[in-house]
Image: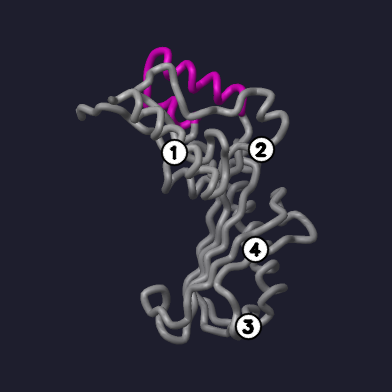
Amino acid sequence: MFAADAVLLDLTHWDAARLVDGPTRAAFERQGARHPKGPAAIGMYLGVDDVFDDVTPYHQLVLDEPLAGTHARSLFVTLSPREDPEFAPAGRRAITVSGHVDADVVAGLSDAAHQEFKGTLERGIREALHRVFPGLAGAREHVAMTATPRTWERYTGRARGRVGGLPFTFETLLHGYPTGFTKNPRLARVGDTVFPGQSVVAVAWGARRVAGALTRTLR
């Protein structure tokens, strides 16, 4: 047990509800009921021979068609710096691919169906990469790992592998975008599922609002 003047939860409301009891849990559960939707993560991690020309390390791939088996229309791709051996040995590059899908995509899948989904996802990501970086099609792969929302749930503890904030839509605002504040002035929440939501700037702004309120409470 730890004593604290205040507690900050960098968690979604779905996950926060699992850590508290009483009225606070009920409040988080009500938020979860009002906002049942949230993006989950997919990803792929590759270690390959360096077949790249002089390309920038960060890319966003906008797909003509949704990624097979998902509704994902974009992927974020990061290439390790060629001159940094801490990321990959000389002559090789590490590639990180990530994207968002509806958490419902894998909900309720049997183990066999999940493996099939994982294979479809892997093929779809590879095809997207090869269209942008044709040299990858013939590159030797030393590491290849694919991540589904179940992978993210296992390693991050986030329910159903959810990442990112709530969809910033009229429907979300209509149901009350969570503010980060609770009825307990010494318990607050920060992160991308409280207003103003996703992006580094939005998360920082939300955290400043919460920090200001806590500072006034603790004086």
Q: Is residue 68 above or below residue 30?
A: below
Numbered circle sitting on residue 168 = 2
Q: Neighbour class for label 4 at 10 Å: few (<14), some, many (≥20)?
A: few
Whole-number angstrom distance, CA of label 1 to CA of label 4: 29 Å
Task: Check disc 1 and report the residue beneath it.
Answer: 208
- Main SS of the magenta part reads helix
Q: Looking at the image, is mark 2 or mark 1 nearer the viewer?
A: 1
Query: In the rendered image, which quarter contains the C terminus?
Result: top left
Which of the two labelled residues, at mark 2 and mark 1, occupies the earlier sequence position?
Answer: 2
Mark 1 or 4, nearer chain start: 4
Query: Percent x, y for residue 125?
Result: 65, 63
Quick check: marks 1 and 3 in contact, CB under 8 Å? no
Residue depicted at 54% across the width and 67% down the height: 78
At x 72%, y 61%, the residue is: 62
Find numbered disc 1 in the image and state the secondary structure of the residue it sits on: helix
Q: Earlier in the sequence, mark 1 or mark 3?
A: 3
SS under mark 4: strand
- Does the CB distance between marks 2 and 1 fall below 8 Å? no
Residue extending furthest toward the top: 23
Range of magenta residues: 13-35
Residue at numbered disc 3? 138
> How far apart in space, not on screen, are marks 3 and 2 (Cα)?
40 Å
Q: What residue type is disc 2 on?
A: Phe
- Residue nearer the viewer, 36 or 173: 173
Looking at the rendered image, the disc whose residue lies closer to the viewer, 4 or 3, is: 4
Type of residue at label 4?
Answer: Gln
Place of residue 135 in the rendered image (x, y in percent of width and height, measured from the top left): 65, 82
Question: Mark 3: which secondary structure?
Answer: helix
**Which label's residue is closer to the chain start, 4 or 3?**
4
Badge 2 marks a residue whose secondary structure is loop
User: Which disc number belongs to residue 60?
Assistant: 4
Q: Amino acid at mark 1?
A: Arg
